[in-house]
Amino acid sequence: MILSVGQNVSSKNTITVESIEKYAEITGDYNPIHFDREFAKTSIFGERIAHGMLSAGYISALIGMKLPGKGTVYLKQEINFLLPVKVGDEITTTVTIEECINSQKGIYRLRTVCVNQKDQMVVTGEAIVKWKEQK
Amino acid sequence: MILSVGQNVSSKNTITVESIEKYAEITGDYNPIHFDREFAKTSIFGERIAHGMLSAGYISALIGMKLPGKGTVYLKQEINFLLPVKVGDEITTTVTIEECINSQKGIYRLRTVCVNQKDQMVVTGEAIVKWKEQK
């Protein structure tokens, strides 16, 4: 496989109550904005939202499994949380090769975006990864 | 509560096989570096490692629950993955108020660091959050 600028992959994930609960179990993140319906009503979001880092997990999954995939070393991720993600939202995550920073070392810059079912960008950012094809 | 520069909180989490498995269930990240012992042996890490984004989850938990805590809106997170995190590692995550960017809007810059039991920094980075005390 050769990585070329513009190459991209996408995945689709639906946010469920179960995924929010499991995420909290693992990370200890029981922020009431995710769990307390009454508290969430008083927040700027008006209802319970998913952990922003859950969307970051979809990005990481695509990078590690698809593009570049096997053998990728994750060096850096920048994440902008633009809009809240809610239960029932369908999140399409796309990773695109933006730049080969150092071809000898296999360092690449990727654009990482999550869009909801209304075509609104909920998360944007970029990743830096190291990758060499494994023979 | 008033947020002041230098203020910090920490948490401690032990990486377990269970947390890695649950994280994969939620995100779909079954990258063989986390699950395939034989494949992992051939990688630069020499053994299976945890998802880097799992440590990012500890950061997010501290920010959302402790500092600033309730009412925080996560705007941005930058994460540098410096060293692999392995099963059994004890990760101490620390969030420190670095700067008040805009006191009127309640925008703050936080330093976010994860250190392992050998006192090695495994993850560094910073977050931008919006926070106002809820009365």
Image (cartoon, coloured by chain):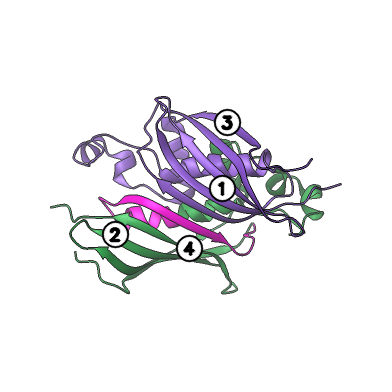
Chain colours: A purple, B green
Q: Name the disc covering residue B19, or none.
A: 1
Mark 1 → mark 3, Cα distance in angstroms: 23 Å
Mark 3 → mark 4, Cα distance in angstroms: 26 Å
> Considering depth in this image, is B69 or A58 the residue closer to the camera?
A58
Look at the image and give the residue range highlighted in magenta.
B59-86
Of labels 3 and 2, the one closer to you: 3
Circles 3 and 2, Cβ within 8 Å, touching? The answer is no
Q: Is residue B60 magenta?
A: yes
Mark 2 → mark 4, Cα distance in angstroms: 17 Å
Looking at the rendered structure, the secondary structure element under dot 3 is: strand
Q: Is residue A32 magenta?
A: no
Label 2 amino acid? Pro
> Eyeballing the image, is A8 above or below A30?
above
Label 4 amino acid? Gly
Between disc 2 and disc 4, whose residue precedes? Answer: 2
Residue carrying label 2: B68
Residue carrying label 3: A11
Looking at the rendered structure, the secondary structure element under dot 4 is: strand
For image coordinates 73% across by 44% down, the residue present is A70
Residue carrying label 4: B125
Evaluate whether residue B96 shows in this view: yes
Q: Residue B131 in the image: x percent, y percent? A: 25, 55
Evaluate whether residue B21 shows in this view: no
For image coordinates 45% across by 46% down, the residue present is A53
Between disc 4 and disc 1, whose residue precedes? Answer: 1
Of labels 2 and 4, the one closer to you: 4
